[in-house]
Amino acid sequence: MFDLSRGNFPTFGASKTGTYVSTLKNYNLPPFILEKVAADCKSDLIKKGRIEERLQSMNDAALELLHKVFVDCAEDADGVFANYRFFAYISSMFHKCEILLNEKIPGSSTKVHKVPIAVKNNGMYVAVGYNKSSGGPISKREAIKFYEMVDDIKKGDHGNQLSEGILGSSVGFDGEALVNLEKLSKSRKKDPQNKIDFKTASFENRIYSVTKC
């Protein structure tokens, strides 16, 4: 893993820090993203205040990381930058909902699924997401595995309100993966107890393209 402690970065000085803050304040940066980046970079972060004030409280390493991820849309070997973007994108789809990372959710099979990002509304899970950030395109096997995970959670005690499953990728999708996910999605019953909207979110050319299966 990369070490993002302040000591490994040069001090920018007021002008560069100010430029980063003035740029980043115009981006969708959810509080949980700021908190995660602050923790990764061993940075201070004031708990409340306008986005500009919160950014100004962060150290140089945190500001550089945020700029790389959201402005430059840079990639890193571990796929961490891509996951940050995916998490922020999911957050933008669900305003005023609780966003949970690396959530453990039991399914009807008694298996406990570790979900990279989950969304709760009024204490109930309403969406789950998974993002492939490195390696080859999402395969047919990976798409089916995602479907089965979401289906198992939906059938479990915690999935009554679950209505969306979002499969993200920064490395593309195999054609068979898309065909099979769409086929599985359309095979579901349409009543509220069974309905789930499966979506794919592909990050290309610095934007997400979302398709409903």
Image (spheres, rainbow, N blue to C red):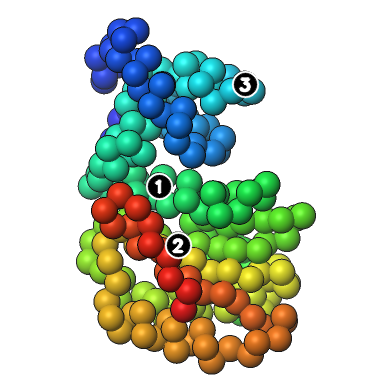
Compared to residue 32, the image places residue 154 above or below, namely below
Image location (x, y in percent) of residue 180? 39, 86
Which residue is depicted at the point 31% across and 10% down? 15
Q: CA distance from mark 3 to mark 1?
A: 23 Å
Q: Which residue is mark 1?
A: 85
Give the quadrant of residue 7: top left
Q: Which residue is mark 3?
A: 49
Q: Out of 159 and 19, give the one closest to the viewer.
A: 19
Give the quadrant of residue 169: bottom left
Which residue is depicted at the point 34% across and 46% down? 80
Left or right position of 177 against 104 = left
- Sequence-wise, the earlier of marks 1 and 2 is 1
Q: Out of 80 and 20, give the one closest to the viewer.
A: 20
Which residue is depicted at the point 54% across and 49% down? 92
Image location (x, y in percent) of residue 12? 28, 12
Image location (x, y in percent) of residue 210? 43, 65
Q: CA distance from mark 1 to mark 2?
A: 12 Å
Compared to residue 137, the image places residue 9 above or below, namely above
Q: CA distance from mark 3 to mark 2?
A: 31 Å
Res 53 visible: yes
Q: Are marks 3 and 1 in contact (CB under 8 Å)?
A: no
Image location (x, y in percent) of residue 143? 39, 76
Quarter the N terminus occupies: top left
Query: Which labelled disc corresponds to residue 181?
Result: none
Element assignment for label 3: loop
Q: Give amino acid for label 2.
A: Tyr
Element assignment for label 2: strand
Element assignment for label 1: helix
Q: Give amino acid for label 1.
A: Arg
Q: Which residue is mark 2?
A: 130
Dot 2: few (<14), some (14–19), or many (≥20) neighbours within 10 Å?
Answer: many
Compared to residue 98, the image places residue 128 above or below, namely below
